[in-house]
Image: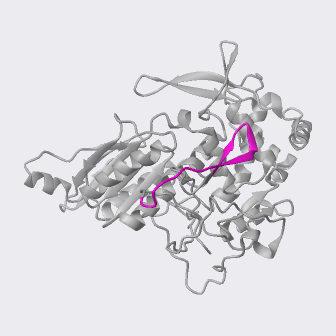
Amino acid sequence: MPMLLSEAEGNTEHGVIRQSCSDPARSETLRTSGSPSHRNWEISAMPGAQAPGGAGKTKSRNPAVYVAEKSDTSVVPEKPSNKGSSPAERVEERDVAKGNTDTSPAPRTQSRISCASMGLEGVREAARRNKGMQFTALLHHVTPQLLAQSFYALRRDAAVGVDGMSWREYEEGLLQRVTDLHGKLQSGAFRATPSRGVYILKADGRQRPLGIASLEEKIVQQAVVTVLNAIYEEDFLRFSYGFRPGRSQHDALDALTVALKGQKVNWILDADITSFFDEMDHEWILMFLGHRIADRRLLELICKWLQAGIMQDGRRVAATKGTPQGAVISPLLANIYLHYVLDLWARQWRERHARGDVIVVRYADDSVVGFRLKSQAQKFLEQLRERLARFGLSLNASKTRLIEFGRFAARNRRDRGLGRPETFDFLGFTHCCSSNRNGGFQIAGP
């Protein structure tokens, strides 16, 4: 089974399909001339395997975006165990076991499949088997039953949106409400409404803007997240922990601790993206979704949510970029964005350029990357800045740091006449180099 190496081109010398959020069905090929020697860390895609049973309608993918690379290796993403957090991972995934009979790529004509005849488990299995497949008719899976389940998955005490509808009020007559809501979704009558804009105080004293959606928006977004998770949980890499089913902050902290203790890490890059949720580009979001999603109605629905804006002081403020923090679907869109912008790129960077161990733990827009060599860390940081800039993002200069950290950091700094190793914060915990009673390395923090 070929590895998913789908990634939008940061520079467009090979041609890129960018989709407008105002019309997700319309695509435009952007081409610019460029030297073949121009540095390019983008990842292209290999054709995928045929869906189980060959069910559903299939269409070919655009060769301007999806190009086979002979150097690409086949991998199988591993899901976390239900029995506990997975150990720390390096950025690469494990190779496909020898003898796997599902590794033969199918013709490009098999790269789309209609999901109308498949349950979500079938969607999940198809996504697992074929990393190049595009899915159609996904909105078919948003049934009245799923809408009811999504309602009960919401917080009962959550703040109300512009509709003023509370969870308890909506529960009265729930069956009829979700039946009507399902009818509006399937007929195209459902309309996205602006979120209610509120602010919460951050730890540093600044205010964080939140968008509180109406209750029916929350229900539909939760249902769409459930459907899309069937696909993207098969795609996301193992070092991504934020806002994913069965993964938590504690899992990310445990993975980081195991990695720092078990790998040859001497330098830590503590990377924070500036105003990430506010800066996500709508067209890139649609571009990334288009690698897997070919359901026009679903893409249009997501566009409506992105462009709905917020209500402040009785007036609507339109959204031209970003996705509201507080919206149910925003964490998934953020993970999809960073899957293509950061995760796949970081894995490929390690495979092509790293010398020695490279570890990655990402939780939403906060990432920790460990290196054996300072020169490697500096090179990665420089190229990460370039990489993010291509997609409208930047690192927060006041929060992003490269520090000496690891089992030998205290000794090495002492030999150079320097003080104790610096500390770094990740997910609310301060990590510092320490030693146990026997003089062995340990991390004080979580």
Residue 323: x %, y % from top left: 61, 35
**Magenta region, residue range:** 17-37
Write the residue at 51% across / 37% down: 276
The quarter of the displayed image where residue 68 is located = bottom right
Colour scheme of the rendered structure: one colour
Left/right placement of residue 403 relative to residue 188 reads: left
Write the residue at 82% across / 53% down: 141
Depicted 242 relative to depicted 80: above or below: above
Left/right placement of residue 114 relative to residue 259 reads: right
Residue 94: x %, y % from top left: 50, 73
Depicted 179 relative to depicted 129: above or below: above
Q: In the rendered picture of this protein, how many numbered marks are placed on residues?
A: 0
Please indicate, yes or no, whether residue 88 appears anywhere in the rendered image. no
Residue 33: x %, y % from top left: 52, 52
Write the residue at 37% across / 53% down: 369
What is the quadrant of the N terminus in the image? bottom right
119 falls in the magenta region: no
Depicted 53 relative to depicted 366: above or below: below
Q: Nearer the viewer, residue 297 or 180?
A: 297
Please indicate, yes or no, whether residue 122 appears anywhere in the rendered image. yes
The quarter of the displayed image where residue 5 is located = bottom right
Residue 389: x %, y % from top left: 46, 42
